[in-house]
Image (spheres, helix red, strand yellow):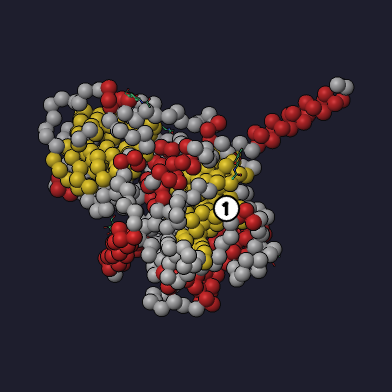
Amino acid sequence: MSTSSFQTSVAVFALLILHAGALDTFTAAVYEHAVLLPKETETPVSRDDALLLMNKNIDILEKAIKQAAEQGAKIIVTPEDALYGWKFSRETIFPYLEDVPDPEVGWIPCQDPHRFGHTPIQARLSCLAKNNSIYVLANIGDKKPCNSYDSRCPPNGYYQYNTNVVYDMTGQLVARYHKYHLYSEPQFDVPEKPELVTFNTTFGRFGIFTCFDILFHDPAVTLVKDFQVDTVLFPTAWMNVLPLLTAVEFHSAWAMGMRVNLLVANIHHVRLNMTGSGIYAPHTPKVYHYDMETDQGRLLLSEVDLHPRGSPTYPAAANWSAHASAVQPFPGQKPPFRGFISRDEFHFTELSENAGNLTVCQEDLCCHLSYRMLRKEESEVYVLGAFTGLHGRRKREFWQVCTMLKCKTTSLATCGKPVETALTRFNMFSLSGTFGTEYVFPEVLLTKVRLSPGKFEVLKDGRLVNKNGSSEPLLSVSLFGRWYTKDSRFISGGISNLETTNLLIFTFLMIIALQI
Ligand SMILES: *[C@@H]1O[C@H](CO)[C@@H](O)[C@H](O)[C@H]1NC(C)=O
Ligand SMILES: *[C@@H]1O[C@H](CO)[C@@H](O)[C@H](O)[C@H]1NC(C)=O
Ligand SMILES: *[C@@H]1O[C@H](CO)[C@@H](O)[C@H](O)[C@H]1NC(C)=O
Ligand SMILES: *[C@@H]1O[C@H](CO)[C@@H](O)[C@H](O)[C@H]1NC(C)=O
Ligand SMILES: *[C@@H]1O[C@H](CO)[C@@H](O)[C@H](O)[C@H]1NC(C)=O
Ligand SMILES: *[C@@H]1O[C@H](CO)[C@@H](O)[C@H](O)[C@H]1NC(C)=O
């Protein structure tokens, strides 16, 4: 090798290192969108009216996409239902749907808008990605013709899917995902099996799922564990439910529990408690937004690691039961009392002193808490709670939860009811539980539904502990476990599915009725 080619090699090598260094992180964006809703109707609108409404929503998304691109974002996630809302029957959603082809066809709708029929929405979204050189995720409705040879084919001859599409910087369709776990969505069909959709970029490997999917093993957990995605794209229309399932709280906890980047774009609709978007890294929330005051959308941007698994901040895996199984239940306890979070019956025990060690058990799950309050506020009561079992009215998903939370009032009968403010600060807390599952999501929620980035951590032995002295006033500290293999499965077959559909429609109407 001559000197000059050696020097060139060194220079190239140095450039490569610089290059790799410069590419360790990328800028991601999510947009919380205050969706313009259609007028309520039981008869379908025309295709033109449907396009008019969708284009008005895209006008707003377009500004966010342009702004994100100007600020250097490589990718932007927009919310579920962002083009038309959520209140539809199979018939009334129909004019909003387009046939979305398999990305394998290699299609740039912006350049070739007529290749797959009438697809103006896909063409416009693709052009937004292309014109601004940014990856765009949007949630649209897909319709797939089927016929009577297919016994599952719906009466109108179309499957209708709640669908995410991703366009790359050239406007090419690179991913399509049909939502699997529908939540009260009579307008859409459940795909035959969960789709595992990933795509590779120069800034990491991505996976996609939607809203309610996040509470289940497939595709969510499989994408992270088996497909090793670096970053998950997560559009949602999430109604906040205190104390355990507000958007920012649960989504940040999922990113931490699964140790993956999670980009969350939620709908903004204050009256329905829909707000809470964020960019969450495995070790900490990077940026989040929760706003029950205004009716405005919001663009969030943050730097995130390309490959979080290779980053020095990547947290070690926790054995969630190691500590709790090793210790004896703390002695000298009052018997627990029963209380409810939503429909789930918890065992609770009160934090009656300003510091202490408590244990509360339900069946095999024992939750241990050590704590010290800065001062015990006379006006506030906290309890430690344990729940293990099938959750909610439907009793389908198996939960294991250890939680320390503020009761709504000083009456113990209000423990578990939603409460949004608190005064009590803690110098120290350490929460652990004898979980039977390896899927546990650590939640810390402060007064006014705020997160606590950098102020708590999960130790390898499964303890969730505060990190840096006294906290802001706490609403709740929880270890939210999902034991997927103990979920009750649907009995397959027409009748039970029909019953389920009716129940879903009923639930949906109930939700609507409650909101009016
Ligand atoms: C994209 O750019 C082309 C040409 O520059 C323009 O005609 C088109 O309207 C733009 N589309 C969008 C959606 O911005
Ligand atoms: C992404 O790249 C990996 C190898 O790095 C490969 O195994 C995987 O199949 C690719 N995924 C897609 C969707 O191309
Ligand atoms: C919104 O949340 C509050 C408390 O967190 C609850 O009282 C109210 O019923 C919720 N509204 C809807 C529409 O669910
Ligand atoms: C977690 O810790 C418990 C108790 O020390 C132990 O029995 C169990 O094998 C550990 N689990 C794993 C996956 O290491
Ligand atoms: C809680 O237990 C720890 C040891 O596990 C002990 O050091 C501490 O004094 C106890 N706290 C209270 C208030 O009893
Ligand atoms: C820890 O607390 C100290 C003082 O309370 C504060 O100056 C520091 O910024 C905190 N560190 C973190 C990482 O929050």
Residue located 86% across and 21% down the image:
1
Establish if 68 lies above or below 249.
Answer: below
- Ligand 3 found in image quarter: bottom left
Q: Residue 422 appears at what percent x and percent y?
A: 27, 45
The residue lying toward the viewer, choosing from 347 and 505, is 505
Residue located 27% across and 30% down the image:
434
- Element assignment for label 1: strand
Establish if 256 lies above or below 326.
Answer: below
Q: Residue 502 appears at what percent x and percent y?
A: 30, 64
Label 1 residue near ligand 2, CB within 8 Å = no
Within the image, what quadrant is residue 48 found in?
bottom right
Disc 1 packing (10 Å; few <14; some 14–19; many ≥20) = many
Say how many tags the image has.
1
Q: Amino acid at mark 1?
A: Ala
The residue lying toward the viewer, choosing from 187 and 64, is 187
The residue lying toward the viewer, choosing from 286 and 118, is 118
Q: Is residue 296 visible?
A: no
Give left or right: position of 374 versus 125. left
- Residue annotated with mark 1: 175
Q: Residue 190 appears at what percent x and percent y?
A: 42, 58
Residue located 26% across and 49% down the image:
395
Within the image, what quadrant is residue 112 found in?
bottom right
The residue lying toward the viewer, choosing from 378 and 394, is 394
Give left or right: position of 334 versus 171. left
Taking the view exactly as shown, the residue that stands out farthest to the front is: 149
Give left or right: position of 162 versus 342. right
